[in-house]
Amino acid sequence: MKYLIIGGSAAGISAIEGIRTFDKTGEIILVSDETYQLYSRCLLSYYLAGVISEEKLKFKEEDFFEKNKVKTFLGIKAEKVYPEEKYVLLSDGTKLNYDKLLIGTGGSAKLEEIPGKEKDGVFVLRKIDDAKKILSKLEQTKRVIVLGGGLVGLRAAYALKARNCDVSVIVKSQQILSQMLDFSSAKIIQEHLEEKGIKFYLGLSAKEIVGNGNVKGVILENGQKIDCGIVIIGKGVSPNLDLIRGTNIKTHWGIVVDENLRTNIEDIYAAGDVAETVDLSSDQPDINALWPCAVEQGRIAGINMAGGSEKYDGSLGMNSLEFYGLPVISAGITRPKGADFEELIKQDTKNKIYKKVVLRNNRIVGMILVQKIEKAGIFTTLIKKKVNVESIRAKLLDETFDFAKIIPLIKEKKEIFKEKEYQDYIFTSK
């Protein structure tokens, strides 16, 4: 059996491990357009901040490919897949045949169509090479503008502030982290960052990046000019679909897959930030571009490519961050729209505490926790299990709420909480 994996990040690496649990001898080939391998993208902002070294970015040992008998094509892009002929064409003209193919091409940073984006000093932060280029530019300038107030943009802003840069963040919407938090919780985070010297411009877009070759500043849509030497575009991520364009592989938000991570084309699978699966909070197709989701999807896809039959139930959109000692976690639907949603909120602005649970038909579908995040695991479990919490809803935001409070619910819904760890709780609490 010949397995071909396109993409060398979380999904691709986990797929190798999944394959090897079932097939110890089959040929595995991995293609990646990066020369750097086996590093964690979600730690890049810490590397940029100088908190961790390049070595600490590694999430697998250097001999991982050798131990798993994987042939690699690194620094080479997979240009196009030919499903009927069952081969992939690489940028150097090489044709790689396959019996089973995994598309784990991930996503690319979204680039605004803004005049001047081609100037020297404009960056994204998606790969280790991006971080290295930014660090090199910091030798010439310490004035930075970040375009975008989402997770990517704020992590970059935080990292560069740690490098003693003058940092301004331009946000088109009226709040930061609009895909992760509601207005009230976002305001707490924004004010916390402002206390540390990061400046925000809300409700404004960048009109133009100016400078003669090198970046000298950004002009906002209101005409204001902000001087800088570096612009970082942090507008989120789009799935890399170029490989399959012109084929019959079905796409929507990303590559559509079934519960086994198979596409509509026989012997072709997809996993990670390029794959569209079911979101467990909305029950709708979506892409949750998260490292843990990519790891789990890759593992299951690999197992199934090698003859296994493991199902992927879906993913939960969940994000966590911590800026200057203030932790935040959100999951599921955080800004509900519609009369059938209900929000339970407790807030202590003075102490930067915010707790919110979103309910729909007495089922938890989302949550936000700022400062006090210890109950996040309980809430995400209840979201994933989709259980009716009417019997405990009055206690959900209490200080005393803990795992013990949901044991009666576990007993009542034991057909849902069928995993061994929950059954052990049922047995020991009798």
Image (tube, grey):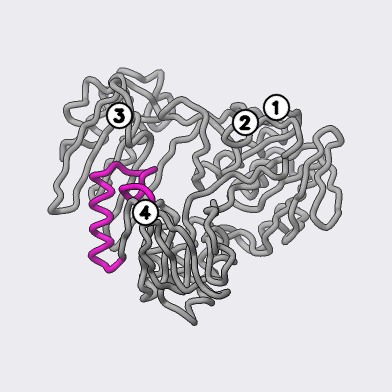
Q: Work out which quarter of the rendered image holds the N terminus and state it.
A: top right
In magenta, the rendered stretch is 172-198
Q: Which amino acid does label 2 sit on?
A: Val
Which residue is located at x 35 percent, y 73 percent? Answer: 166
Q: Which amino acid does label 1 sit on?
A: Asn
- Looking at the rendered image, the disc whose residue lies closer to the viewer, 3 or 4, is 4
The mark nearer the N terminus, 2 or 4, is 4
The mark nearer the N terminus, 2 or 1, is 2
Residue carrying label 1: 264
Residue 350: x and y in percent read 12, 53
The mark nearer the N terminus, 3 or 2, is 2
Whole-angstrom CA distance, mark 2 to mark 4, is: 35 Å
Secondary structure of residue under mark 3: helix
Q: What residue type is labelled 3?
A: Thr
Look at the image and say whether residue 304 sits in the magenta stretch.
Answer: no
Residue 318: x and y in percent read 41, 42
- Looking at the rendered image, the disc whose residue lies closer to the viewer, 3 or 1, is 1
Side of 40 relative to 371 (left or right): right
Q: Can residue 51 be seen in this view?
A: no
| On screen, residue 142 above or below 323 | below
Which residue is located at x 33 percent, y 36 percent? Answer: 334
Whole-angstrom CA distance, mark 4 to mark 1, is: 42 Å
Q: Work out which quarter of the rendered image holds the C terminus and state it.
A: top left
- Looking at the rendered image, the disc whose residue lies closer to the viewer, 3 or 2, is 2
Q: What residue type is labelled 4?
A: Leu
Which residue is located at x 72 percent, y 36 percent? Answer: 306
Q: Can residue 133 be seen in this view?
A: yes
Residue carrying label 2: 256
Whole-angstrom CA distance, mark 3 to mark 4, is: 57 Å
